[in-house]
Amino acid sequence: MTLTKRVKTAAIKKGQKHESDTGSAGVQVSILSKKIDKLAAHLKANHKDNHSRRGLLQMVADRRKHLKYLERKDSNTYTELIKTLGLKK
C-alpha cells in the first residue's frame, strides 16, 4: 500500500512551506492523508482485512497528533492546510 513517487511528490508540494521542505508537520499531514485515502479505498474492497484496518487507525491517530501540534504552534498554517487538503475540523 505504498504511494507512487508522483503521488508522494504532489502531496509534499501541497504541504510545503518552502522549496526544500520535506519533513515539516504540514508535509507529514499531507502524505498521511494520501496514505489514509488509499488504504480506506482498499478496505472498502477488502472489509475483512483487520491488519490493514489497524494500520489505518494508527495513521489517523498520527495525523491527528500532527494537526494538534500545528494548530498549537502555527494556527495560520493549520487553517491553510485544512482548506488545501479538504479536511474537516
Image (cartoon, rainbow, N blue to C red):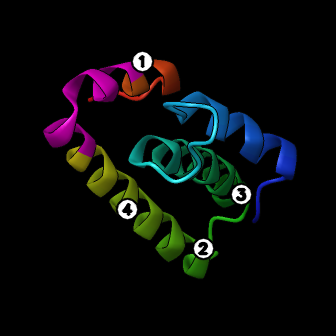
Q: Residue placed at 62% from the left, 53% from the top?
A: 35
In three-dimensional space, the C-alpha distance between marks 1 and 2, rounded to whole angstroms, equals 28 Å
Q: Which residue is mark 1?
A: 83
Residue type, numbered disc 1: Lys
Location of mark 2 (residue): 52
Counting other residues with Cα less than 10 Å from the Cα at mark 1, is it few (<14), some (14-19), or many (20 or more)? few
Q: Nearer the viewer, residue 56 or 31?
A: 31
Disc 3 residue type (three-letter)? His
> Label 3: few (<14), some or many (≥20) within 10 Å?
some
Out of 79 and 57, give the one closest to the viewer: 79
Give the labeled residue for mark 4.
62
Q: Earlier in the sequence, mark 4 or mark 3?
A: 3
Q: CA distance from mark 3 to mark 1?
A: 25 Å
Question: Looking at the picture, how far across and down is residue 1, in whole percent?
Answer: 75, 65
Q: Is residue 47 above or below residue 25?
A: below
Cβ atoms at labels 2 and 3 below 8 Å apart: yes
Residues drawn in magenta: 70-80
Q: Earlier in the sequence, mark 1 or mark 2?
A: 2
The residue carrying mark 3 is 42
User: Earlier along the polypeptide chain: callout 4 or callout 1?
Assistant: 4
Q: Is residue 58 above or below residue 45?
A: below
Could you tell me the amino acid type at mark 4? Answer: Asp
Mark positioned earlier in the residue sequence (3 or 1): 3
Residue 27 at x, y = what percent? Answer: 52, 44
User: Is mark 3 in CB contact (under 8 Å) with mark 1?
Assistant: no
Residue found at x 60% / y 52%: 40
- Inspect the image, locate mark 2, and give the three-letter code of the amino acid beneath it: Ser
